């Protein structure tokens, strides 16, 4: 047949050392289980970075639509995996990316503080507001006031379909 063998992809090794079609395998209690491979998570993150880029000047509804289309397909493909923690970590990271994009879209410090108050965060007596801080967008997206105001319920109301929620619905079906 004169076929060429790709030496990088071809190997004989234990199953938990390799991956196939984006799936990795691991040994748990004497059984081989399926997980999402690290490379697949890296590719997912690069796509989510592109969709949640703070320099992409689109509305949050359009951004959410693009993200949901991608996430539903990705989760459907990897629904065979047994890695709940991976989906939780991806959700946490994606919500932080969305908080960052929302923070940029609010632009001025007055708008940022007023929107946080509308979302239910109450500033203390000595607080000037979160928007006055000199943190860049990624670091600001991890501040407690933003996490409290833009929590899971907020993103669910905005239409975000979580990776973990989609995965658990497919696992139960």
Image (cartoon, grey):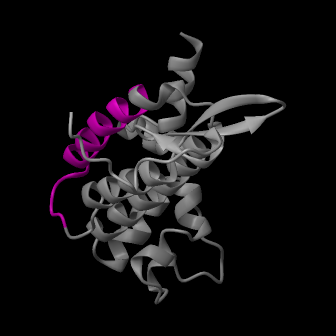
Left or right side of 158 for 28 = right
Assess whether residue 41 is covered by the magenta stretch: no
Residue 4: x and y, percent? 25, 47
Question: Can you say whether 140 is above or below 81 in the image?
Answer: below
Assess whether residue 60 is covered by the magenta stretch: yes
Determine the residue positioned at 26% across, 54% down. 51
Give 54 or 37, whichever is nearer the viewer. 37
Left or right side of 72 for 128 = right
Tell me the quarter of the picture where residue 30 sits. top right
Give 130 or 155, whichever is nearer the viewer. 155
Query: Which residue of the protein is positioned furthest toward the left in this rendering?
Result: 57
Q: How many marks?
A: 0
Determine the residue positioned at 53% across, 30% down. 165
Q: Residues in magenta?
A: 56-76
Residue 130: x and y, percent? 51, 77
Tell me the quarter of the picture where residue 122 sits. bottom right
Residue 147: x and y, percent? 56, 59
């Amino acid at each position: 047949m004169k076929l060429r063998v790709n030496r990088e992809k071809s190997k004989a090794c234990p199953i938990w050392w390799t991956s196939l079609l984006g799936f990795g395998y691991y040994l748990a209690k004497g059984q081989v289980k399926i997980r999402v491979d690290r490379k697949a998570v890296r590719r997912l993150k690069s796509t989510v970075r592109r969709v949640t880029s703070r320099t992409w000047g689109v509305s949050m509804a359009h951004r959410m639509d693009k993200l949901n289309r991608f996430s539903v397909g990705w989760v459907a493909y990897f629904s065979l995996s047994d890695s709940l923690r991976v989906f939780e970590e991806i959700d946490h990271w994606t919500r932080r990316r969305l908080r960052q994009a929302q923070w940029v879209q609010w632009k001025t410090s007055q708008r940022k503080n007023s929107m946080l108050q509308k979302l239910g965060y109450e500033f203390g007596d000595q607080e000037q507001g979160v928007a006055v801080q000199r943190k860049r967008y990624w670091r600001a997206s991890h501040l407690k006031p933003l996490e409290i105001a833009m929590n899971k319920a907020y993103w669910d109301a905005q239409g975000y379909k979580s990776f973990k929620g989609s995965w658990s619905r497919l696992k139960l079906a």
